[in-house]
Amino acid sequence: MAVTMHDVAQRAGVSIKTVSNVVNGYPYIRAETRQRVQSAIEDLGYRVNMSARNLRTRRTGLITLAVPELSLPYFAELADSVISAADAAGWTVLIEQTSASRERETEVLSGRRRHLTDGLIFSPLALGPDDLGLFTVDFPMVILGERVFGAPADHVTMNNVAAAKAATLHLASLGRRRIALIGAHEGEQVGSAALRTTGYLEGLAEAGLPHDPALVGEAGLWHRSTGAEAMRRMLDDGTEIDAVFALNDALALGALHALHAHGIDVPGQVALIGFDDVDDAKYSVPALSSVDPGRDQIARTAVELLLERIGATGDPAPFRRVVPDSRIVGRESTGDVAQGQEGRLVSVQEGGIETVEVASG
Amino acid sequence: MAVTMHDVAQRAGVSIKTVSNVVNGYPYIRAETRQRVQSAIEDLGYRVNMSARNLRTRRTGLITLAVPELSLPYFAELADSVISAADAAGWTVLIEQTSASRERETEVLSGRRRHLTDGLIFSPLALGPDDLGLFTVDFPMVILGERVFGAPADHVTMNNVAAAKAATLHLASLGRRRIALIGAHEGEQVGSAALRTTGYLEGLAEAGLPHDPALVGEAGLWHRSTGAEAMRRMLDDGTEIDAVFALNDALALGALHALHAHGIDVPGQVALIGFDDVDDAKYSVPALSSVDPGRDQIARTAVELLLERIGATGDPAPFRRVVPDSRIVGRESTGDVAQGQEGRLVSVQEGGIETVEVASG
DNA sequence: CGACTAGTGTGCAACGATGTAAAGCCGTCG
DNA sequence: CGACGGCTTTACATCGTTGCACACTAGTCG
């Protein structure tokens, strides 16, 4: 049925191997021969059979991106960036959704689908430092996020503590004294929630503000709905606030909704800042201030590190941790700009590259 | 390096083929043999080599989903649904982003990546009826959307005209007389814009309202930014309006932003309804009324039709067109519910299944 | 003039799995 | 008792490519 190299070879009057050579850009081929093969390919509509090539070369040209859910804008935009970056390098991305469940995240590392691709960019949300063992794998991997540190893999993360501290200080610099936090994970030691909460506390301390537990709102999943709920609870409790730092933009947008429902003016009565700087932030009412963690740079870096490792032949290079620069973007919800204006850059937290030696398993 | 069936066979003391049979669930195997093989598999950590299997079976277990951009919430949520539906059936999804460019959409149909997967779910945005020829392909395909009709492929679409008409009539039923449209594509004959505009005009006619061209706002790309711009232009022109029908939710959220920036109360002065019912709609301020086109059903149906066709052996079944039911969900932006309430179902447009005979190429 | 190099092209043996067909080993039926 | 059919296992060829080694031609160098 399908056209194979054999058919092309026959038509062009050359050997199969020569067709292969032409297809793969082998240099030592007479122009005339190459031309004849190419014509035969076009005439017959030949396409190389990837399965056969992959079997032979032990490469698939695919990489996996594993994220919790595409319907979360942050991950959708991350996926967009990763796909574009991979595409530019001639690679194809396969997306797995884990729903942030332990089972599915474990499966990503070892499941049936694992060997479909040459490498993995993994943003875990359920697995944590106790599962470090699971991360000792024998394929190229780049880890995103702050759930797991010290795994034998490259790691692209963000400057969570510093950025959260900067966000908190930004609210304080506007004269706000009762700064609430939305999205905490009580008792959690690792992960974005813990790190950003740490930054929040550091920010309060530096601004000379007391820490009031009533100002900390829990939200397990960082969705709009949970943000709205957490905000609603705090307002119903009658807690006095004049600012909110939401640990991501979805929470912030949910909180904004709840604030509005309570007839509270933003930023007049309450200033609000989120985290992630997703596209929505620009278009909410009022436009949402946020922390831009350098998502595009994260995606590009992750792809770059992964492809480097996939292509590596000799001794394994030491594992690296890369932290792109994050920035605070002030918009209407903190009163940084007037309605209809663009957000403005309020501060930059510089990251960097760190090289970590980890004994290979 | 990697463990192969050969290694497993040796360890279990059986033939390679028996290992293969165990792995593939062939029934006629003694329990004791199966057990021994399974132990060997576990001991050695064997995983089947997909490339080899694919080469042999001529199946990859992958399907492609081609959409314009994942960062558009509608497509992100669609992708989420498609991946979940495929996953439930044991299939894996590979996503291609076309940026809605002709070149990339053409490439999806014929490019290097095409043969990586067993089938294609394609949501074209640049290619149109003039390109019908390109859609005559020799692999299973399901087309989404309303750019191309009559292609030799299954088609899952939505009830655009009827749903848009219902949305318009809904605004009219609230007593609105100056109903603006945001997102028109002037001169376009096909596609969502044209169909929804038709529905809008039908709705106006049925409500006995005149059609005023000043009320029609263009927006090429359906992003928040273009929706905001179109709305801004109309307001700056001093056009009098008391309602807006935006052709999708991104446009609507952008328009909402512009309305707010002009100090216009929604829904007090202007009622607003969108299209797509993305997750954001629930959490905007005010919550956005919208048309739910049955996205989840679209995704499930598309996967179902595609897998059916991939699995088909005998005569090709006639091509089908499936139209899921769409619904109008009333929220705050049309004053259908009070603040903080859930959206409520305002009307349902019933779709259906249609079977179309198309001569196979 | 022989040895070498660069340029072209080819044959063969894999890569790791599965489809086909067929070989044993029973028990049972006529 | 021989044929038959159900169960269990196996041998072998094969899917479509590419890596390796090598053959052959010319031109060049010492």
Image: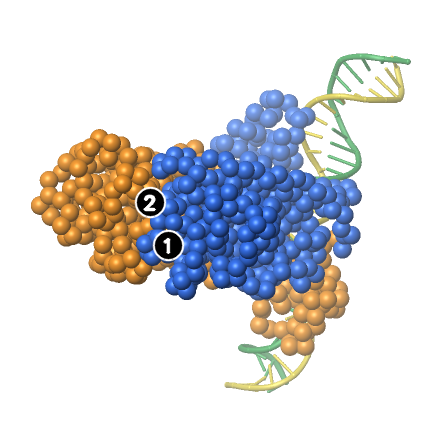
Chain colours: A orange, B blue, C green, D yellow
Label 2 residue SS: helix
Q: Position of residue D2 (x, y in %)?
A: 89, 19
Point 62% across, 33% down: residue: B24
Q: Nearer the viewer, residue A266 or B203?
A: B203
Q: Is residue A348 left or right of C25 when viewed as pictured? A: left
Q: Which residue in the structure is indicated by mark 1?
A: B259
Query: Could you tell me how far apart the alpha carbons at marks 1 and 2 are, in whole angstroms?
Result: 18 Å
Disc 1 crowd rating (10 Å Cα; few below 14, some 14-19, many 20+) is: many
Residue A81: give its label.
none
Point 43% across, 43% down: residue: B334
Q: Is residue B232 left or right of B58 when viewed as pictured? A: left
Q: Nearer the viewer, residue D17 or D29?
A: D17
Residue A300 to residue B277: above or below: below
Q: Nearer the viewer, residue B126 or B311?
A: B126
**Which quadrant is home to the C terminus of chain B?**
bottom right
Question: What chain does badge 1 belong to?
Answer: B
Q: Is residue C18 left or right of B43 when viewed as pictured? A: right
